[in-house]
Amino acid sequence: MIMSPFFPIPIELVHKEFTKQMMAQLAIVHAVLEMNTHVMTQFSWVCSRLMVVSR
């Protein structure tokens, strides 16, 4: 067990919490990106449909 010289909190615990936070952040970012990609795909599809219709 490595102890931090500044806080009486085990480094592993802090690291674990930090990692968990990071993972949560990454998951959120990933979800948002996925959603954006989906929206853009839909949008481009709709645009192409409109182009075809407007001709």
Image (cartoon, rainbow, N blue to C red):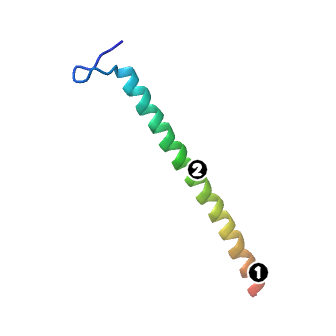
Q: Which residue is mark 2?
A: 31
Q: Which residue is mark 1?
A: 52
Q: Residue furthest front?
A: 8
Q: Taking 50 as reference, is 25 left or right?
A: left
Q: Position of residue 47 (x, y in %)?
A: 68, 75
* Quarter of the figure with residue 9: top left
* Quarter of the figure with residue 39: bottom right
Q: Secondary structure at mark 1?
A: helix
Q: Position of residue 21 (x, y in %)?
A: 45, 37
Q: Quadrant of the N terminus?
A: top left
* Residue found 75% across the figure and 76% down from its top: 49
Q: Tag 2: Cα neighbours inside 10 Å, few (<14), some, or many (≥20)?
A: few
Q: Which of these two is toward me, 38 or 28?
A: 28
Q: Which of these two is toward me, 16 or 8?
A: 8
Of the two numbered discs 1 and 2 in the rendering, the one whose residue sits closer to the viewer: 2
* Residue found 27% across the figure and 20% down from its top: 8
Q: Residue furthest left?
A: 6
Q: Secondary structure at mark 2?
A: helix
Q: Taking 55 as reference, is 11 left or right?
A: left
